[in-house]
Image (cartoon, rainbow, N blue to C red):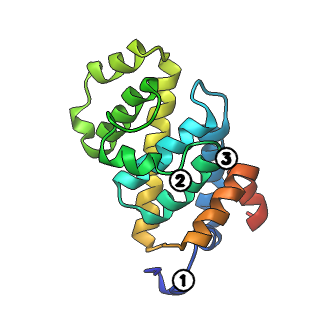
Amino acid sequence: MSFLPSLGRDATLPELFKAYPATARKRLPFEEEVMRGPSPLSVARRELIAAYVSGLNSCGHCYGVHAATAEAFGVADGVLESLIGDVDSAPVEERMKPILRFARKLTRTPDRMVAGDVEEILAAGWDEKAVHDAALVCALFNCMNRIVSGAGIVGTEPYYKAGGAALAKDGYAAIADKLGL
């Protein structure tokens, strides 16, 4: 239920974007670059991080949409639930676990980040660009979770699936075009 009376009770994120087009117009190209631009982290891995961070933040809307998007890119159903419970026992490739622990710590206790958090990622065979990109995805979704939660934007399973399918097919830049921003 939206907290913003001008949007109505059942407002969606696109409606929030349309209500505040100046910020959406600037943010969506950045989101496209972070989530779809060149990276050592595949699109599936970035969507996995996005959904994981959103789940840690209990942002049902972002979790639902990005879990569906991650699944559209090949992340198995149920993986995210396992990750939120325990990264170490979750059925994800071992190489991703340091990145996911990094994302969890950066989300939950950013003041406790240490060089060892990055060293663990590098030791798993990732480069510095992967660390940077993981931090960007984490930061982007911590920000978006707060925007969405602060506005009271929620959704439904059908909405999450449709949103995930649209993001998987068209990416983030297409949102601005579809909304006429």
Assess disc 3: are there few (<14), some (14-19) or many (≥20) residues with their C-alpha within 10 Å of its C-alpha.
some
Q: Based on the displayed image, in which of its 4 quarters is residue 150 positioned?
A: bottom left
What residue is at 54 percent from the left and 86 percent from the top? 8
What residue is at 61 percent from the left and 70 percent from the top? 159
Amino acid identity at mark 1: Asp
Residue placed under numbered mark 3 in the picture: 29
Residue placed under numbered mark 1 in the picture: 10
Amino acid identity at mark 2: Ala
| Horizontal side of residue 174 vs 113, given as left or right | right
Assess disc 1: are there few (<14), some (14-19) or many (≥20) residues with their C-alpha within 10 Å of its C-alpha.
few
Residue 111 at what x, y percent from top left? 23, 37
Residue placed under numbered mark 2 in the picture: 67
Is residue 114 shown above or below 178? above
Q: Are marks 3 and 1 in contact (CB under 8 Å)?
A: no
Amino acid identity at mark 3: Pro
Return the residue nearer the eye: 152 or 49: 49
Question: Mark 1 falls on what kind of element?
Answer: loop
